[in-house]
Amino acid sequence: MSRSVLVTGGNRGIGLAIARAFADAGDKVAITYRSGEPPAGFLAVKCDITDAEQVERAYKEIEDTHGPVEVLVANAGVTKDQLLMRMSEEDFTSVLDTNLTGTFRVVKRANRGMLRAKKGRVVLISSVVGLLGSAGQANYAASKAALVGFARSLARELGSRNITFNVVAPGFVDTDMTKVLTDEQRANIVGQVPLGRYAQPEEVAATVRFLASDDASYITGAVIPVDGGLGMGH
Ligand code: NDP
């Protein structure tokens, strides 16, 4: 059955791989983008998730075209790395506003239709560093750790309504976000990953699609690592 799927930040990187995985399976996929030319093959809606009005407008457009969102993948996220002593309040709050409050905005709006439908699947993209910590990423790690408490609270609040909330925690994935790292940083990271390499975005997408599938009907409140073993034990 073709479902209405929304992937925030589905115009590139991990989000685009996730959008493709759902589209390949026959779902109706909407993606958000902020600027430039979005990739073809999806319903692309312009939306900055830090702006509640843009989120509302995006949902209206998606509902008019694909119907209420049945699967939401909250993937959009940013980094603004800096050591604490040099991290400005804006560096901190802007990352939280995108990664955490932005996720709240899109999840809350999706929930309206899911409650009415008495079913829904929500997958949040966190990060291995949310639970491991990462020097220079206190803002990002805090925002990604917060997604776990957010998802688990909603799993309890809305489980009786047949809506599942799960978290995927990728390790290091080959995208624009990690292209900024130096060769030395990359080699250092890979040295700590049991599988000895970065992930491809498609490897994260496969787990997301599983969590939204019938095969995952009894999974909620879970945090699934896709990190090559980097975070083992947390
Ligand atoms: P990219 O930097 O390649 O892409 C980020 C995406 O998020 C883009 O589509 C971007 O849209 C979107 N986005 C950022 N801010 C906003 C906003 N305010 N409103 C709407 N969309 C926004 O990152 P990745 O693909 O690597 O990361 C995707 C997710 O996976 C993120 O949440 C990231 O934290 C997480 N992650 C990534 C890892 C990695 O190693 N790459 C590891 C662990 C987690 P636009 O194109 O308009 O800028």
Image: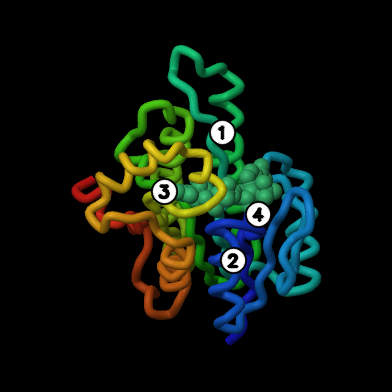
- Residue 43 visible to an observer of this rendering: yes
**Which residue does the image show at 60% across and 59% down from the upper left?**
111
Could you say whether the residue bearing mark 1 is in a helix, strand or loop? helix
1 or 4: mark nearer the eye: 1
**Which residue does the image show at 37% across and 50% down from the upper left?**
171
- How far apart are the two marked residues, 4 and 2, measured between alpha carbons? 9 Å
Residue for badge 2: 114
- How far apart are the two marked residues, 1 and 3, measured between alpha carbons? 21 Å
- How far apart are the two marked residues, 1 and 2, measured between alpha carbons? 27 Å
**Residue 51 picture quarter:** top right
Q: In the rendered structure, which disc, 4 or 3, sits on the residue that comes first in sequence?
A: 4
- Dot 3 amino acid type: Ser
Q: In the rendered structure, which disc, 2 or 3, sits on the residue that comes first in sequence?
A: 2
Residue 153, which numbered label? 3
- Dot 4 amino acid type: Arg
1 or 2: mark nearer the eye: 1
Q: Is residue 135 shown above or below 41?
A: above
Residue for badge 1: 95
Residue 31, percent across and down? 68, 62
Q: Residues within 10 Å of mark 2 (few under 14, many from 20)?
A: many
**Which residue does the image show at 61% across and 21% down from the upper left?**
90
- Dot 2 amino acid type: Met
